[in-house]
């Protein structure tokens, strides 16, 4: 078994706190505690009922909505994960990450000085260097999907070397996929060891653990896998690769977010959350922000602890912001594409 | 600059729903409303008006007519006049009207929602997403029942003119629960909304006009308690349906006693919310929010008593407190508000007083750190821990956002705590163990049991109480019976109907000439023969005037003993239908074996012909066979309610039923009334015919040889009305059937109000027990049971 190891000191030199006044301690690897997951029970119907009313119990309108949408942008991992990605479209994506909303629109919203950018840019390994170059001079980290993304059906050795190579290429964040088989067969020690090994391989880079919840069969499995990955040092837990047939849903997110809360209450460590796949509308992004605020609190409304994995979401948010600013419904072509 | 600031603080801002359309509606009516009678708006003959206010800011909303006695008269006669034509319409035609009402509610849903929120103080989220959609659903569902009445309930007809009195907590929804089934079954209606919340009912009246509902079919009269009292006492009303407090329900029960009015009461509650240690605690917390912070806790079925297994209590309390901090109390028209305003200052005062009592009695109070708005009537969500059943707040309905929490150690203790209440409206059970959930659900005394959910409603499921939470069901097929009566009832007689005629002397019927040995019929209690406590006996004379024997004169103590014995036999309820059937068949077998003896006894007592006596014995045996046959067949239903939910409608025995048997029929009357009660799992205290008691006392020898567990059927002889009075006033008797005089019927209904017994009385109308249409059938089973709806959501 891999022992808990505190990477805290090493981390401080690499990660600059951006918005928080003090840097949160990076989550460590904690010893595996199977007792902590033994009693986990998730009732799907009750979870769905809560998820269904999150967006009906709370809403934000007018300037509150505009502000919240800007905040949503700051939490987007602007993503392209396609077979036909080339340096050309990745450079465009990075330009969009730097200036996600037209400056004139930002000024008409009264936030011209905000220096808004997305939370990160997320690409495949081959495009890391392109992205790092394109983002020079900004704080925007490059995230790389890894470990045989999306299915993860390659050897452990390959996975670890993929991580190390991506970190060497300049990725500051690594989005790994867990072996779903470990969850489906109840091999929690194996899952823990795998995750802890990924975390170690990441070194200073932050690691997001993709659970691929659409392939984990039950919400109880989702909750248990969330806890194991957090114990094994995941900085973030993430719903999906975007490639499963069911990706981020509010019920699944609710279960993961509650696991994060439980973990925080038990250990004092704050783990981040990243829903990914299928979040395309501004309205959806608000529902997720409401989820985070209601279940976890305002700390989880910042990119340090919350990200959207999304590609087309930004365009819809831009249109909504322009609608707020002008009172006119906007068109996609009025906003620079990525 | 503002957006920049919000970007940092990430606060929710205000999100008010527009009230412009509602204001316009009020203004167009000069903020004044008359009575809706006979399809028109009439000024009240009383010349009185009252005012309605918005509890969130105390603003004046409207001046509303107060119906006096004469106004009630007018409304009732309008409903009476409209009745024949409405009842004669085809089911399909009534379905069209109900369908139109449903569509209208949907089309004007936002106006209804805003108006309801303004008038009641409940959050717009609830009126918009819960109340109004359920209203539309209720009318759609009952449009279906209107269509189906003649095929689904061919033996039934409308009750007539129905008076309906509804509460202020779900004004339009309760209107729908009342009006939809009444109209579907062919009744006409006089409805009185609560005085705090009349507005949506008045808008509904306009909708009735819009759809062209025939004049007088629905009459809406506004007013307060006096108006309601005038309705309850009105001779022209055939049925009263009331939802409200148990206190008022009791008054209505007494006021209507003996009037022949059908009555359904949906009253208060103190419903348990039971949390076992293996439940999904985060989901439990949201369940608690839905249970007690829904509609400011002003919900009759609110899960107001939190019962938590000790092992997880601390953890759960902490989670609940964290959640409470995040609840938002404020302007009900704000879309981001969880808790709105309390309906009126009088209700707020009640809440404050009960909370103070809780504090005084030593319970530990917790409220969130934030403060409520001060301009309206608001009360913060409140959690009491360290509560015990002895505390007032654990027993009394608070009807506010106040949760009282207690712990338990074992499932058995959870059930004991859950049932330690006079009420029995609803319960919520949380566990991930289906064995445990389905074990507890039948043990909890409640009309609705929600497993891993709470406050879920649907028109297809019946809703209503056990114990002092009232009787009758609303919704589903079980709810329809409140609005129909059996056609055959019209054939009941004003005088007792004897089977056969007393025409010959006993001696002429071949009975032994020798004097019989002096047998001593006793009472039969707990499976044993018992001498009367008082030590007195009454002579029983035969048809020829000779004394046939003597039976014990039962008194209070005999009744007490019999009721105790009946309770001790509670395991009878849990035996299988098959096992009950076996016992019943055995009774029939043994009765047949001694048939001649029973024939002779009937002849001796009544002087009827041997043929008639034989008929009575044969009919009795056949009836026992009938109830043996249905013992394992009268089962429940799975209702089509919300998605991914098995909603089980389970008929459960009432419990201990007292049966005051028909005096006119020695054996068949006894069998026809006692056996169905037993067949459904009840335990019975029977008071047999006083004129001809010996068939019943002979019968206990049949019971002794038929494997009937002791206490299932207890027989106390004596004066029927005297014993009926003792039974009606016994709080541990759950139901009482009375087949006798009008005066006795009135006494039974009146005296049963104290513990809200289920009563079934004959009002001085007499069945022909020999006629199967009168003496046997499904109605006996329905009266012997009450439906419990168990909601079981599923999905892993």
Image: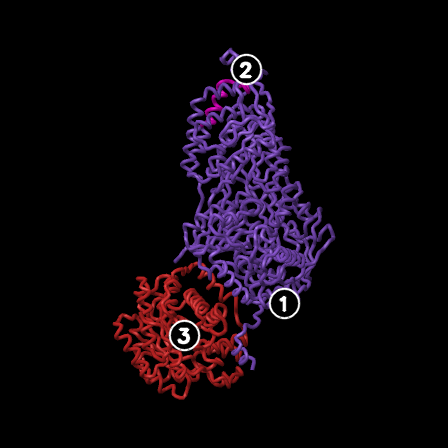
Provide the major secondary structure of the magenta segment.
helix
**Residue under mark 1: which chain is it in?**
B
Indicate which disc, 1 or 2, sits on the residue closer to the N terminus: 1
Mark 1 crowdedness (10 Å alpha carbons): few <14, some 14-19, many ≥20: some
Residue B448 spot, x, y in % from top left:
50, 49
Q: Which chain is purple?
A: B
**Residue under mark 3: which chain is it in?**
A
Is A295 colored magenta in this rendering?
Answer: no
The residue indicated by pointer 1 is B373
Q: Is residue A144 above or below residue B350?
A: below
Mark 3 crowdedness (10 Å alpha carbons): few <14, some 14-19, many ≥20: many
How far apart marks 2 and 3 lie (CA) works out to 101 Å
Q: Quadrant of residue A40?
A: bottom left
Judged left or right of residue B26, residue B434 is left
Q: Which chain is red?
A: A
Residue B109 spot, x, y in % from top left:
55, 60
Residue B481 spot, x, y in % from top left:
53, 43
Position of the N terminus of chain B by quadrant? bottom right
Q: Residue lying at the far bottom in this picture: please name it.
A: A137
Q: Is residue A238 above or below residue B465?
A: below
Disc 2 or disc 3, which is closer to the eye?
3
* Labels 1 and 2 within one chain: yes
Mark 3 secondary-structure assignment: loop
Magenta-highlighted residues: B604-621
Judged left or right of residue B56, residue B630 is left
The residue indicated by pointer 3 is A27
The residue indicated by pointer 2 is B504
């Amino acid at each position: 078994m891999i022992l808990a190891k505190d990477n805290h000191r090493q981390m401080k030199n690499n990660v600059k706190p951006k918005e928080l006044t003090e840097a949160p301690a990076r989550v460590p690897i904690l010893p595996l505690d199977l007792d902590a997951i033994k009693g986990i029970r998730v009732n799907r119907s009750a979870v769905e009922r809560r998820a269904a009313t999150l967006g009906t119990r709370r809403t934000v309108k007018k300037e509150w909505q505009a502000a919240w949408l800007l905040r949503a942008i700051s939490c987007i991992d602007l993503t392209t994960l396609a077979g036909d990605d080339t340096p050309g479209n990745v450079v465009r994506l990075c330009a969009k990450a730097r200036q996600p909303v037209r400056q004139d629109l930002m000024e008409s919203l009264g936030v011209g000085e905000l220096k808004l950018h997305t939370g990160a840019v997320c690409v495949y390994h081959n495009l890391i260097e392109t992205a790092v170059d394109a983002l020079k001079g900004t704080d925007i980290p490059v995230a790389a999907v890894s470990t045989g993304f999306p299915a993860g059906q390659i050897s452990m050795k390959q996975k670890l070397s993929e991580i190390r190579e991506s970190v060497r290429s300049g990725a500051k964040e690594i989005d790994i996929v867990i072996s779903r088989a470990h969850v489906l067969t109840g091999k929690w020690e194996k899952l823990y060891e795998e995750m802890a090994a990924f975390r170690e391989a990441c070194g200073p880079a932050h690691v997001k653990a993709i659970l691929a919840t659409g392939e984990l069969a039950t919400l109880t499995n989702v909750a248990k896998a969330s806890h194991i990955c957090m114990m094994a040092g995941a900085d973030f837990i993430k719903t999906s690769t975007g490639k499963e047939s069911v990706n981020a849903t509010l019920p699944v997110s609710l279960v993961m977010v509650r696991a994060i809360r439980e973990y925080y209450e038990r250990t004092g460590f704050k783990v981040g959350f990243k829903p990914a796949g299928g979040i395309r509308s501004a309205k959806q992004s608000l529902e997720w922000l409401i989820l985070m605020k209601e279940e976890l609190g305002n700390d989880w409304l910042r990119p340090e602890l919350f990200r959207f994995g999304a590609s087309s979401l930004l365009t819809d948010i831009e249109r909504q912001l322009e609608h707020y600013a002008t009172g006119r419904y906007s068109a996609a072509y009025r906003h620079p594409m990525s | 600059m503002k957006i920049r600031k919000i970007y940092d603080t990430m606060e929710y801002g205000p999100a008010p729903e527009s009230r412009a359309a509602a204001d316009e509606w009020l203004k167009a009516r000069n903020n004044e409303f008359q009575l809706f009678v006979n399809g028109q708006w009439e000024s009240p003959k009383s010349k009185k008006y009252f005012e309605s206010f918005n509890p969130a800011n105390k603003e004046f909303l409207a001046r509303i007519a107060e119906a006096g006695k004469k106004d009630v008269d007018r409304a009732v006669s309008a409903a009476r006049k409209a009745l024949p034509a409405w009842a004669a319409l085809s089911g399909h035609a009534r379905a069209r009207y109900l369908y139109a009402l449903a569509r209208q509610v949907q089309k004007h849903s936002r106006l209804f929602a805003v108006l309801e929120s303004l008038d009641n103080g409940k959050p717009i989220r609830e009126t918009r997403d819960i109340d109004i959609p359920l209203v539309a659903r209720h009318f759609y569902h009952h449009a279906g029942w209107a269509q189906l009445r003649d095929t689904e309930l061919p033996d039934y007809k409308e009750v007539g003119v129905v008076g309906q009195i509804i509460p202020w907590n779900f004004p339009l929804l309760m209107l729908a629960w009342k009006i939809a089934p009444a109209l579907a079954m062919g009744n006409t209606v006089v409805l009185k909304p609560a005085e705090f919340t009349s507005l949506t009912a008045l808008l509904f009246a306009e909708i009735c006009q819009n759809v062209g509902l025939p004049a007088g079919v629905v009459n809406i009269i506004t007013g307060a308690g006096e108006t309601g009292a005038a309705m309850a006492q009105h001779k022209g009303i055939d049925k009263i349906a009331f939802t409200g407090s148990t206190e008022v329900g009791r008054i209505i029960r007494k006021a209507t006693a003996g009037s022949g009015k059908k009555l359904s009461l949906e009253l208060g509650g103190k419903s348990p919310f039971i949390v076992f240690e293996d439940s999904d605690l985060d989901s439990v917390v949201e369940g608690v929010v839905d249970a007690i912070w829904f509609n400011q806790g002003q919900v009759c079925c609110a899960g107001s008593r939190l019962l938590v297994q000790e092992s997880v209590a601390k953890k759960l309390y902490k989670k609940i407190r964290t959640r409470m901090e995040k609840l938002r109390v404020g302007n009900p028209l704000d879309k981001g508000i969880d808790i709105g305003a309390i309906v009126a200052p009088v209700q707020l005062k009640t809440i404050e007083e009960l909370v103070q009592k809780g504090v005084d009695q030593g319970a530990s109070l917790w409220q969130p750190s934030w403060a409520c708005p001060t301009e309206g009537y608001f009360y913060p969500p409140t959690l009491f821990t360290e509560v015990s059943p002895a505390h007032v707040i654990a027993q009394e309905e608070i009807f506010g956002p106040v949760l009282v929490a207690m712990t338990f150690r074992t499932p058995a203790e959870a059930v004991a705590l859950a049932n330690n209440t006079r009420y029995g409206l609803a319960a919520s059970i949380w566990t991930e163990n289906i064995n445990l959930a389905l074990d507890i659900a039948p043990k909890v005394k409640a009309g609705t049991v929600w497993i891993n959910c709470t406050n879920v409603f649907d028109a297809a499921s019946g809703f209503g109480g056990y114990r002092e939470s009232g009787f009758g069901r609303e919704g589903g097929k079980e709810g329809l019976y409140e609005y129909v009566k059996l056609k055959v009832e019209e054939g009941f007689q004003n005088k007792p109907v004897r089977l056969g005629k007393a025409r010959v002397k006993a001696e002429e019927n071949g009975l032994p000439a020798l004097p019989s040995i002096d047998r001593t019929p006793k009472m039969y209690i707990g499976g044993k023969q018992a001498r009367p406590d008082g030590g007195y006996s009454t002579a029983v004379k035969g048809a020829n005037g000779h004394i046939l024997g003597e039976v014990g004169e039962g008194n209070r103590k005999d009744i007490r003993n019999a009721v105790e014995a009946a309770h001790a036999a509670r395991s009878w309820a849990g035996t299988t239908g098959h096992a009950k059937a076996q016992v019943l068949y055995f009774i029939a077998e043994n009765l047949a074996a001694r048939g001649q003896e029973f024939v002779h006894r009937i002849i001796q007592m009544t002087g009827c012909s041997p043929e008639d006596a034989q008929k009575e014995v044969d009919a009795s045996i056949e009836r026992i066979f009938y109830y043996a046959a249905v013992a394992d067949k009268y089962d429940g239903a799975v209702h089509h309610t919300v998605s991914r939910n098995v909603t089980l409608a389970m008929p459960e025995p009432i419990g201990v039923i007292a049966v005051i048997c028909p005096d006119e029929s020695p054996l068949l009357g006894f069998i026809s009334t006692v056996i169905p009660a037993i067949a459904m799992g009840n335990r019975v205290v029977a008071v047999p015919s006083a004129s001809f008691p010996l068939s019943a006392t002979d019968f206990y020898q049949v019971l002794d040889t038929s494997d009937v567990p002791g206490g299932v059927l207890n027989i106390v002889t004596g004066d029927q009305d005297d014993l009926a009075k003792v039974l009606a006033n016994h709080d541990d008797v759950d139901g009482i059937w009375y087949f006798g005089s009008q005066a006795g019927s009135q006494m039974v209904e009146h005296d049963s109000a104290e513990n809200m017994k289920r009563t079934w009385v004959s009002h001085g109308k007499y069945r022909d027990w020999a006629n199967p249409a009168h003496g046997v059938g499904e109605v006996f089973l329905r009266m012997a049971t009450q439906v419990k709806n168990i909601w079981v959501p599923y999905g892993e």
